[in-house]
Image (tube, helix red, strand yellow):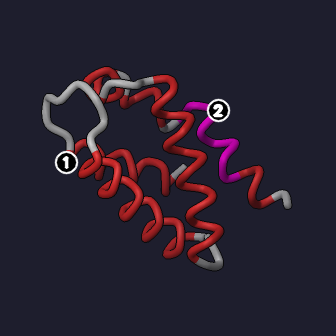
Amino acid sequence: MKSTLLILLVLITISSCKEKWDEEDKRAFFTACTETAIKDWAPNDSVAKVYCDCLFDKMAKKYPEEEDMLAHIDKLAKDTDLIKCKQEILNR
């Protein structure tokens, strides 16, 4: 959960009042997510990539517009679907 919070804080800082996720913001998300996952718990880049892909896919489905995601930022850290991304990897 600590990792998810850090990633969400990075998202807040890189996001402006844009509606759709653009490529720059996606790259920034994946860079921050991968670095955080490797630092905190993921044993390598490929595991971190699987985790970050899962996080982004689930988050973008729920909040296809960045502005909507930012409006619900407090819910993301506790979102069980997002938490499952890490749990599924650790249970392998």
**In magenta segment, residue 52:** no
Q: Which mark is residue 13?
A: 1
Residue extent of the magenta highlight: 78-86
Farthest left residue?
16
Q: Which mark is residue 80?
A: 2
Magenta segment main secondary structure: helix
Residue 46: quarter of image: bottom right
> What distance separates the C-alpha of mark 2 from that of mark 1?
24 Å
Q: Residue at x 36, y 53 (%)?
A: 29
Quadrant housing the C terminus: bottom right
**What residue type is disc 2 on?**
Thr
Q: Who is closer to the viewer here, 10 or 64? A: 64
**What residue type is disc 1 on?**
Thr
Q: Position of residue 70 (x, y in %)?
A: 29, 29
**In magenta segment, residue 83:** yes
Farthest right residue?
92
Residue 89: quarter of image: bottom right
- Say what secondary structure mark 1 lies in: helix
Relative to residue 90, is residue 44 depicted above or below? below
Q: Residue at x 52, y 66 (%)?
A: 37
Q: Position of residue 39 (x, y in %)?
A: 49, 75
- Whether residue 80 sits left or right of residue 78 in the image: it is right
Q: Position of residue 19 (x, y in %)?
A: 23, 25
